[in-house]
Image (cartoon, helix red, strand yellow):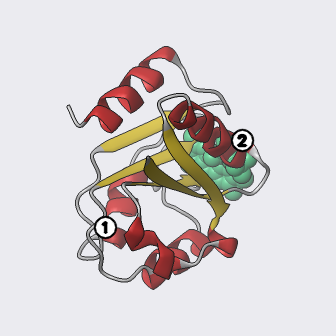
């Protein structure tokens, strides 16, 4: 069975619930998910998975200067250089994600393969387009 780790950083719960929803979606596709917060994640265990999904709430000035928050950046810095087959990013937001994914990618560059998924949601649920994007991500298409 393939395995996924979904690591999230959440302030008020939305991103955590989205991470759990992603976990349920992957489980329905016969992928064993583990959902863990950045604070509880052992970065050394990340190399031994098929899928790695990293999420953070969107922080910024609502329409500009979006970025992951400091605990997520600190977590990203700890990730050892590794070759997880497939990496995806996700975020929750209210108005605009702007530079969020570019910032996340920048913090991960050189440690992980380039992310193949950027999933954003204004809520803790997966929209149909999000489900389709996840479907393509796990299928590798
Ligand atoms: C200080 C602060 C800054 C935020 N900046 C943005 C922003 O730039 N763009 C946006 O769309 N949402 C922004 N938001 C909204 C959050 O990204 C959104 O509510 C998110 O779902 C919260 O996730 P959480 O419940 O996992 O903490 C901001 C929220 C806060 C508290």
How far across and how far down the image is residue 112, in percent? Answer: 29, 68
Q: Is residue 57 above or below residue 82?
A: above
- Tag 2–tag 1 contact (CB < 8 Å): no
Q: Quadrant of residue 136?
A: top left
* Circle nearer the viewer, 2 or 1: 2
How far across and how far down the image is residue 5, in percent? Answer: 51, 57
Q: Within 10 angstroms of label 1, few (less than 14), some, or many (20 or more) residues?
A: few
Query: What whole-number distance in Å separates the C-alpha atoms at marks 2 and 1?
Result: 25 Å
Residue under the image location 57 percent in, 55 percent down: 56
Left or right for 136, reference 38: left
Left or right for 119, reference 12: left
**Which quarter of the rendered picture does the C terminus lie within?**
top left
Question: Is the residue at mark 2 in contact range of ligand 1, meaning its CB lies under 8 Å from it?
Answer: yes
User: Is residue 4 at least partly visible in the picture?
Assistant: yes
Instruction: Determine the secondary structure under disc 1.
Output: helix
Along the viewing direction, whichever of 7 and 60 lies nearer the viewer:
7
Residue under the image location 58 percent in, 78 percent down: 42
Instruction: Determine the secondary structure under disc 2.
Output: helix
| Residue sitting farthest toward the front | 1
Q: Is residue 63 above or below residue 87?
A: above
Residue under the image location 28 percent in, 32 percent down: 139
| Residue sitting farthest toward the right | 12
Q: Which residue is mark 2?
A: 17
Going from N to C along the chain, the mark reached first, 2 or 1, is 2
How far across and how far down the image is residue 82, in percent? Answer: 30, 75
Along the viewing direction, whichever of 129 and 40 lies nearer the viewer:
40
Identify the disc placed on residue 97.
Answer: none
Identify the disc placed on residue 106.
Answer: 1
């Amino acid at each position: 069975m393939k395995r996924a780790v979904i690591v999230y950083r959440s302030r008020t719960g939305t991103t955590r619930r989205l991470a759990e929803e992603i976990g349920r979606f992957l489980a329905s596709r016969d992928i064993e998910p583990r959902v863990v917060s950045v604070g509880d994640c052992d970065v050394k265990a990340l190399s031994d998975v098929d899928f790695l999904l990293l999420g953070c709430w969107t922080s910024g000035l609502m329409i500009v200067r979006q970025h992951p928050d400091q605990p997520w950046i600190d977590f990203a810095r700890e990730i050892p250089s590794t070759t997880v087959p497939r990496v995806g990013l996700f975020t929750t937001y209210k108005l605009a994600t702007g530079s969020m994914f570019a910032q996340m990618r920048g913090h991960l560059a050189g440690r992980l393969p380039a992310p193949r998924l950027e999933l954003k949601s204004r809520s803790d649920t997966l929209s149909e387009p999000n489900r389709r994007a996840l479907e393509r991500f796990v299928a590798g298409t």
